[in-house]
């Protein structure tokens, strides 16, 4: 059985600028907790291969996916299809989320304008 706890996982900064702690990374999928401080934003980007789901667990912010913008908060889950441009801007209390990626997250699959 593979069980990992967030305090055991070292954080790192992704290519888009968010700080994540990757809990699991297999050949098929990945699960990470991501965090942005108040007012911090990811760099607008897309993934050619990965489909992502963001589940907001603390705070909130403004999420843009392919030009569609909305405020997101605790309990909101957003589907980000492969190839969709996206950016998350943290609100005044920051934002913490779970990010599920299929196939798993890769720096090499992160593209900018």
Image (cartoon, grey):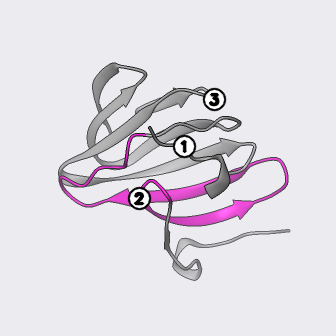
Callout 1 crowding tier (Cα within 10 Å): few <14, some 14–19, many ≥20: some
Please tell me in which quadrant of the rendered image residue 64 appears.
top left
Residue 53: image x %, image y %?
56, 36
Residue, far left: 92
Q: Earlier in the sequence, mark 2 or mark 1?
A: 2
The residue located at (60%, 73%) in the rendering is 5
CA distance separating discs 2 and 3: 19 Å
Is 48 displayed left or right of 57 in the figure?
right
Is there a contact, CB below 8 Å, between mark 1 and mark 3?
no
Q: Secondary structure at mark 1?
A: loop
User: Residue tagged by mark 3?
Assistant: 82
The residue located at (45%, 57%) in the rendering is 34
CA distance separating discs 1 and 3: 11 Å
Quarter holding the C terminus is top left
The residue located at (58%, 77%) in the rendering is 9
Residue 74 seen:
no
Callout 3 crowding tier (Cα within 10 Å): few <14, some 14–19, many ≥20: some
Quarter holding the N terminus is bottom right
User: In this view of the protein, which residue sits in the foreground, 53 or 58?
Assistant: 53
User: Residue tagged by mark 2?
Assistant: 18
Q: Earlier in the sequence, mark 2 or mark 3?
A: 2
The part of the chain drawn in magenta is: 15-44
User: Residue tagged by mark 1?
Assistant: 111
Is 110 displayed left or right of 1 in the figure?
left
The residue located at (74%, 60%) in the rendering is 25
Q: Secondary structure at mark 3?
A: loop
CA distance separating discs 2 and 1: 14 Å
Q: Earlier in the sequence, mark 1 or mark 3?
A: 3
Total marks shown come to 3
In front: label 1 or label 3? 1
User: In this view of the protein, which residue sits in the foreground, 87 or 8?
Assistant: 87
């Amino acid at each position: 059985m593979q069980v990992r706890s967030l305090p055991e996982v070292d954080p790192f900064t992704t290519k888009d600028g968010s700080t994540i702690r990757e809990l699991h990374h297999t050949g098929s999928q990945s699960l990470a907790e991501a965090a942005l401080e108040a007012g911090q934003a990811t760099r607008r980007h897309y993934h050619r291969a990965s489909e992502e789901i963001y589940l907001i667990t603390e705070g909130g912010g403004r999420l843009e996916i392919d030009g569609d913008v909305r405020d997101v908060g605790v309990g909101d889950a957003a589907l980000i299809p492969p190839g969709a441009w996206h950016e998350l801007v943290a609100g005044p209390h920051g934002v913490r989320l779970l990010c599920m990626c299929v196939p798993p997250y890769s720096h090499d699959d992160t593209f900018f304008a």
